[in-house]
Image: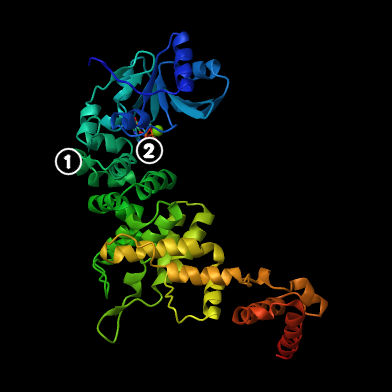
Amino acid sequence: MIPTAFSLFIPKEIRAMAERLEGAGRKAYIVGGALRDHAMRRRVGNDFDMATDASPQEIVALFPRVLPTGIKHGTVTVLSGRHGVEITTFRLERGFSDGRRPDSVEFVADVEEDLSRRDFTMNAMALEVTTGRLHDPFGGREDIARRRIRSVGDPALRFAEDGLRPLRAIRFAAQLGFEIDADTLAAIPGAAPTFRLVSQERVREEFLKILLSPSPSAGLRLLESTGLLADVLPELLASRGCPQKGMHAFDVLDHLFLAADMAIDDPIIRLAALFHDAGKPAASAPGEDGEPTFYNHERISADLAGQALRRLKFPNDTIERVLHLVRNHMFNYSEAWTDAAVRRFLARVGVESVDGLFALRLADSAAIRGTPPDPLALEPFRKRIDAILEQSAAFSIKDLAVKGGDLASIGVPKGPMMGNILRDLLETVLDDPAQNESEILLRIAASLKARYGAA
Ligand code: ATP
Ligand code: MG
């Protein structure tokens, strides 16, 4: 392979790292996503991966700020300015008996040997920093030009080594808008047993990248057609072929995929969009008019989402926020709502969740027939909410003009009674904000105390 000249803007910190390695008689190459993005004429981010024939110990000795990210496998992170660069020693990997990690790694001297262990041809290129020479032994540039994801070597063997690779292929397809080459694609279903050995954390990271890609549905459809959906998100399988009603043009699963596409690229909103109706198949019952009904599906959807997100080890606060949106996605505002009804809605969902619920609703509506989201659809409701918020009314117990301590001072015991009285006071104030005065509330509380005490 004759190396080719290739011009990539390399930040000066990265260049300085390469020069330091070369000063020590070693080689330094840029590999991975930055090179791929550059070959695609995409904007290259701050995230650079490097490869070198220096050993991890040599790298540690050469640079002042080094994190031992994966020192056993030959990877360290060198920090410089805004950049954290993963520098990996050229290596071969052998004997993937667990389908996850090599049994052993062997450091090698030749960059092209190192490239041969990498997953896809587009990821198996290396640019020598100081000379600008490109090594592309597997035709990565040609595959990039043809927008094609192809395994380095026999895909079935490469997938049997590391079960994450099939999911990475699908993730890159969604992220880059590429096709997976026929042979590589055909090897994915057979890789399912190895895929099942991969840790949920690694699966989650790739799944999130699919979800945040320009077209999540492209990745989700590939998951479905290759059978991996049964392992990644079995909670969604029952939605395939589950009919909807009314204006809906798609079955539940296509509606969910499309909702993810239509949602703003925020992980919480996209996760909520993907799961919001997943409970419909279980909730479906024939209605009087012959059309199905889906009573309570938002609860079942939230349960299914919780199960999936916990398995994928999402952080608890992410899970909570997603489930909250899913549970509350069925609001149905009309101008007939009284101010008290708007306040009750705000008290129920929380003022801080309104933006998320609106974003979810826009995606949901757009996915009914596949029309683009209509940003004005919720304007009337938004205006009502803004007007109510201007009145600085109380929407939660902490907004009340009396606190637990005030109730204690009129003899309300701490415990369930105090909680009940505070909730009743909030109901009162939601009905009529003018009651949110400490004198008035204390009077009401005193009579409630007498009533609860007598009960
Ligand atoms: P991005 O960082 O944009 O997600 P990337 O290609 O840089 O994409 P990384 O996960 O940062 O992906 O990995 C860097 C490089 O390491 C890849 O380009 C590829 O050459 C190699 N690589 C990563 N994961 C694997 C794997 N599971 N099997 C084989 N090679 C891999
Ligand atoms: Mg990278």
Q: Residue flagged by tag 2: what amino acid is it?
A: Arg
Name the residue located 27 percent from the left edge and 34 percent from the top edge: 158
Q: Quadrant of the C terminus?
A: bottom right
Work out whether mark 2 precedes mark 1 in sequence or the reverse, and give the earlier one: 2
Q: Residue flagged by tag 1: what amino acid is it?
A: Ala
Q: Nearer the viewer, residue 89 or 253?
A: 253
Q: Judge from the rendering whether residue 283 lies leftward or rightward of residue 394; answer left or right.
A: left
Q: Nearer the viewer, residue 111 or 164?
A: 111
| Residue 377, image x, y percentages | 38, 67
Image height of 442 relative to 170, above or below = below
- Neighbor class of circle 1 (other Cα within 10 Å; few <14, some 14-19, many 20+) is few
- Quadrant position of residue 64: top right
Mark 2 and mark 1: Cα distance apart in space: 24 Å
Determine whether the residue tagged by mark 1 lies in a helix, strand or loop.
helix
| Residue 237, image x, y percentages | 30, 61
Quadrant of ligand 2 in image:
top left
| Residue 356, image x, y percentages | 47, 61
Instruction: Tell me the tag on residue 100.
Output: 2
Asked if disc 2 and disc 1 are in contact, CB closer than 8 Å, the reply is no
Give the residue number, with chain letter if any, for mark 1.
182
